[in-house]
Image (cartoon, coloured by chain):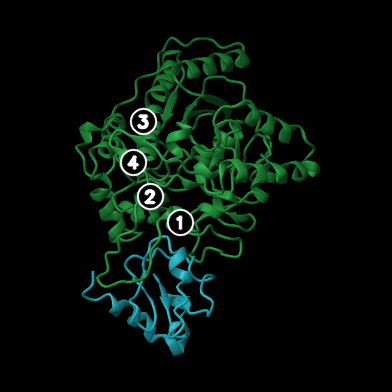
Amino acid sequence: MTYVIVEPCIGVKDKGCIEVCPMDCIHGTDDDKMVYINPEDCIDCGGCIPACPVGAIFAEGEVPEKWQRFTQVNADYFNGKR
Amino acid sequence: MLAAKQRNPRSYRIVGPQRQIDERETPHPRVDRGELGERLRSWRNTRAGQDPFRRIFGVGGGDPKNCLQLIMRQLPEGAVNPDRTAVSDPAGMARNIKEVARFLGADVVGITHLDQAYVYSHRARDKAAMGQKAGDPIHLPYRYAICMGFASDYYKFLTNNSRISDADYGLGNNHMIAPTFMLAAYIREMGYPARAHDYARGEVNPIPLAVNAGLGELGRHGMLIHEEYGSRIHLSVVTTDLPLAVDEPVDIGVTEVCKYCMKCARTCPSYSIPFGGKEVYNGVEKYRINVDTCYKYRLAGRGQWTNCVICVSSCCYNKPKAWWHTLAVWSIKRTPIPLRPLLIKPLLWIDDLFWGKRPWRHMKWLDYDNAPVPVTCDIPGCQVKHRDLQHKQLHRPTQAAGGSVS
C-alpha cells in the first residue's frame, strides 16, 4: 500500500508533507502543478496526512472515487525516474 | 486461558485470553518471507550488510561462520547432569543464580514464573544441532524464567542513527549470548533442565517476562524501561525447573511518565509510536506500536545506518549513571500515584531543557562520523527541499500514525 496525493494539492503545493515524510519520498519540480508520493518508497506511516492543509493525501485504499485516477498519476510520475 | 501466577504489573494489564504467538509472525521472519515487501527483504539480505562491521553482527549477506550469533545458534545444548544438587532453599538458590548471572556479565537480573503465554507456539528457524525445524511446535514446560539485562553504552546510542549506534546495538545482542549459554549450562550441570533464550536462539518473548521479573516496566514504545538504563538494555532469558524464589513486578512510575512524556512518540521518525492511550491486543491492554512502519523505516538509512534506536535514546529514563537521575526516579517511586503528575511534569520540562527534545550527540569513532548529511534526492529533476532527520519537525499529538497497526 502507499499514500496518494490528489487534486486539492494542485495549485497549492504547501509542501508541509515534505517536511514530515521520514522516507523523503515526496517529490516534484517547481514547474509541476503538485507534488507526488513515490509508491515504492512510501512506508504507509501516514505522517503526511495531518501536515497537508487541504486534505489532499489519502491511503491508497481510501482515495475518494472522484480522485481515483491520482493513484496512477502519482505512480506514473516516477516512471523512468527510478 | 494461559494465566500468570504473579500479580499484574501496572504498565500492562491482562484483560482477556491470550494466545501464544507463533515466532513466524514476528518481524524478522515476516521480512525474510517478503511479507513487508520485496525491497525490504532484499535490503535485509544484502545492502544492510554493505559495511563489514555490520556483517560480523549477522546483518546482510556475510559468511555465517564470521558471525558469533549465527555460530552459537547452531550449537547443541548439553545434557542435564544426572547427579542433581538438592535445593532446600529456593530463595538462597535465587541469590546464587543472580550472583552468577552478574558475574557472567548481566547488568540486571530477575526471576519470574514462566507464563506460557509468552512462549512462542512454533519456531521460525531450523536448528539442526537440536534436530529442530522451522514450523515445529515449541514445548517449553519449565516453571521459571531467569531474565537478564545487558546495558548498552549511553553515549554511543546518542549518536542515533549511525554506524556507531549500530555497532553498539549489535554488540549488545552478541554480549548476551555467552552469559546466557553459560548460566543455562551451569543449571544443567546442577542437574536441572535449562534452556538459553538469547539473540542467537529464543523461544520466548523476553519483554513481558522481564516486566514480571521486576527488571522494569513496559513503556509507550513497547520496550522494557529499566529505572537506571532506560531501554538501552538487551534482554535474555534462561528457562528452567531449578527451584527458585521469584521476584515481583516493580513500579518505577512508567505508567504516569509515559502518559505525559510522549518523547518517543514525538521523535519516532516513522510515526510508529502512538500518542493516544492503550489498546487491547491479544488479551493485553498496552500501548500498541506499528511494527511494520518501524521496520520499514530502516530503508531510510541510505547506507548510513541499519538499526533505528531513536526511541531508546529519547526516553527520559535513558540517562548516564548519575545521582540526579537516581534521585529523580527515586522521588517518582516514593510519591503517591495520584500526586505523581505534579512531580513528573516539571521533571519532563527539565529533561527537555537539559537533554533536548530530540536527544542526539555528534561523535567521531573509528572512521565513522555521525554529523548530519544533506539528503541527496535520487529522483532526477526533483527540486523540493528534503531535510535530514535532525532538521525535520518533531511530531505533535495531533499527528497520528495513519498506517495499520500490527
The residue depicted at 28 percent of the width and 30 percent of the height is B68
- Nearer-N-terminus badge (3/4): 3
The residue depicted at 69 percent of the width and 41 percent of the height is B347
Disc 1 crowd, CA 10 A, few/some/many (<14, 14-19, 20+): few
Residue B398, percent from left and from top: 60, 65
What's the chain of the residue with tag 1?
A: B
Residue pointed to by mark 2: B372
The Cα atoms of the two marked residues, 3 and 2, are separated by 28 Å
The image shows residue B173, relative to residue A72, as above or below, that is above
Is disc 1 in contact with disc 2, using a CB cutoff of under 8 Å? yes
Residue pointed to by mark 1: B391
- Nearer-N-terminus badge (3/2): 3
The Cα atoms of the two marked residues, 3 and 4, are separated by 23 Å
Please state which of the two labelled residues, at mark 3 or mark 2, is closer to the viewer: 2
Residue B193, percent from left and from top: 45, 22
- Hue used for the chain lettered B: green
Residue B69, percent from left and from top: 31, 32
Closer to us: A63 or A80: A80
Q: Which mark is on residue B369?
A: 4
Kindly state the secondary structure of the residue where label 4 is placed. Answer: strand
- Nearer-N-terminus badge (4/1): 4
- Nearer-N-terminus badge (1/2): 2
The answer to whether dots 3 and 4 both sit on one chain is yes
Q: Which chain is cyan in the rendering?
A: A
Residue B170, percent from left and from top: 36, 36
Task: Please state which amino acid type lies under the numbered disc 1.
Answer: His
